[in-house]
Structures are given as C-alpha cells and as structure tokens.
C-alpha cells in the first residue's frame, strides 16, 4: 500500500515536479504517490503542474486555518506532507498531527541560514555575505518553528567566487531536486523515521541517501554539483 503524499507549495513548483518525475522514474518501486497539492495562493505555478498530472488541488486562502488545511488533507487521505517551496508557517495543530510525517526542503545547510524570513534569494544573499565556501540543500522534519525540525539529509554545493545569489540559487535548487524526492521516498518506505530522541534515524543505510558519499549516476545526470569532501 503506497503512502499518499500531500504537497504544500507557494511558488513555481519545481520541487513538486522533481517529486513527480522521480516517482515516475521509480515506477512500481515507488513507495508514495502525490495525491494532493495545496497552494498558499491561486497563482502558484505548482497548481498548474498538479492539474497537468490529474492531481487534486486546493488553495488555502488563510494559511493559519488549521481546520481548513486538516480537512483538505483528510479528504485526500494524506499520510505524509511535503513542503515544497511553501513559504508559510504550518498551523501547529497540523504540525502536531503529522509529527514525523511532514518534511520541508530548505535551500541552505541548516541550522545556518534558516529561520523566519530566510527564504528564496535572501538565503543565498546571506550565504554570500558570510563568505561561506559551501552551501547546499537540507531536508528536515517540520516542527512548529521555521526550519528547526530534525535534519534528515543534506547535499553540499560549492560557493564559487563569482557567484551571485541567482547563480548560487540555481545550483542549490538542482541539489534540492535530487535530495527531496529521495528522502520523501525513503520516509514513505519506512527507511527513515523521526526517533524518540527527536532526531532522524535510518532503519538501514538506504542506498538513495548514500549518494552524498558515493557517485550516483542519477544525481549526476540531474546536473547536481558534485562536491568532493576530500
Ligand atoms: C526555491 O527557492 C527553493 O529553494 C525553495 O522554494 C523555492 C521555490 O521552489 N525550497 P519551487 O520551484 O516552487 O519548488
């Protein structure tokens, strides 16, 4: 029985698209299917991507409305929630209900460069201003605060001397597109979970998540920067 995934989005939906493409590539091996896309506004490009795949959609007029969000997730029988470029804080009752079953992707290596107001270009501006030589993507469990939940996986991306916020954002976004779908499938398959100590733990060392340490043709094909931790 595959997990039923609900995706929350605010923007163009490239992370949603990466989830859909990875699920299609896995075919019968996939452990979860996206069954609902909830957008924080009617103009989110993610809605169009969902409709193109025949996936149910909803628009959350009031992102603080826990009852409305909970009802939309219930109606679609959602087991697992993924924030894919979602810019609002999820109401605490919904976060509590999906503890250990809600993931977010952030375009930096948390706990650095995260928290309220740290999204989009602001993140990459802060990374460049800091002089950091490595940025990357983080997937973490969601708790009641922005970008604070237990980290599940990260992928490093080099910061180049001539980087602008836009050029760095482009490379980090490709890392997000490689990382998020693999973590979502691992959670859906029960290969990663939120432990009683509040940290992510792996039932086994899932090969998909080892790709940060071993060459992965699929990830390389995705054009993700390889940063050799030599
Ligand atoms: C991107 O900046 C990404 O880094 C962050 O959300 C933004 C929009 O992503 N996770 P998407 O293209 O809407 O998935």
Image (cartoon, rainbow, N blue to C red):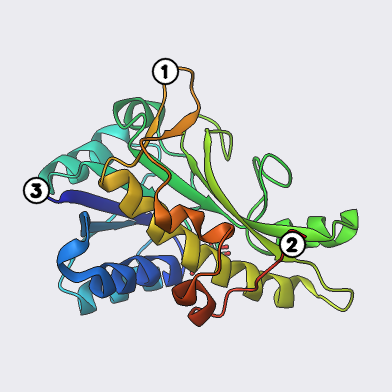
Within 10 Å of disc 1 (Cα), the crowding (few <14, some 14-19, many 20+) is: few
Q: Which residue is mark 3?
A: 1
The alpha-carbon separation of the residues under discs 3 and 1 comes to 25 Å
Q: Residue drawn 34% across and 49% down?
A: 186
Residue 168: in sight, yes or no?
Answer: yes
Tell which of 47 and 197 is nearer to you.
197
- Would residue 73 be found to the left or right of residue 122 on screen? left
Please tell me the numbered disc located at residue 124.
Answer: 2
In the picture, measured across the screen, residue 219 lies left or right of residue 99, that is right
In this view, the residue in front, 99 or 200, is: 200
Evaluate if marks 1 and 2 touch, with contact meaning CB atoms under 8 Å apart.
Answer: no
Q: Quadrant of residue 111?
A: top right
The residue nearer to you, when weighing 183 against 216, is 216
Q: Is residue 61 visible?
A: no
Looking at the image, tell me whether mark 1 or mark 2 is earlier in sequence order.
Answer: 2
Examine the rendered structure and indicate whether residue 36 appears above or below residue 75: below
| Dot 3 or dot 2, earlier in sequence | 3
* 178 or 85, nearer to the observer: 178
Image quadrant assignment for residue 161: bottom right
Sequence-wise, the earlier of marks 3 and 1 is 3
Instruction: Confirm or reject: label 3 Cβ below 8 Å from ligand 1.
Output: no
Number of marks in picture:
3
- Residue 196, disc: 1
Q: Tell me the element at label 2.
A: helix
Q: CA distance from mark 3 to mark 2?
A: 39 Å
């Amino acid at each position: 029985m595959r997990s039923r995934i609900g995706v929350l989005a605010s923007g163009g939906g490239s992370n949603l698209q990466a989830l859909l493409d990875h699920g299609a590539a896995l075919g019968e091996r996939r452990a979860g299917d996206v069954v609902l896309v909830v957008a924080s506004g009617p103009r989110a490009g993610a809605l169009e991507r969902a409709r193109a795949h025949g996936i149910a959609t909803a628009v959350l007029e009031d992102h603080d409305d826990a009852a409305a969000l909970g009802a939309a997730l219930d109606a679609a029988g959602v087991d697992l929630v993924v924030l894919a470029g979602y810019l609002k804080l999820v109401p605490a009752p919904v976060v509590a209900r999906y503890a250990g079953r809600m993931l977010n992707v952030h375009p930096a290596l948390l706990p650095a460069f995260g928290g309220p107001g740290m999204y989009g270009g602001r993140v990459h501006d802060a990374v460049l201003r800091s002089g950091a030589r490595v940025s990357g993507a983080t997937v973490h469990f969601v708790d009641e605060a922005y970008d604070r939940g237990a980290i599940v996986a990260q992928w490093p991306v080099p910061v180049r001397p001539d980087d602008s916020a836009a050029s760095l954002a482009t490379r980090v976004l490709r890392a997000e597109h490689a990382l998020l779908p693999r973590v979502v499938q691992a959670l859906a398959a029960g290969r990663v979970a939120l432990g009683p100590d509040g940290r992510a733990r792996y039932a086994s060392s899932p090969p998909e998540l080892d790709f940060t340490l071993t060459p992965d043709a699929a990830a390389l094909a995705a054009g993700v920067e390889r940063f050799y931790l030599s």
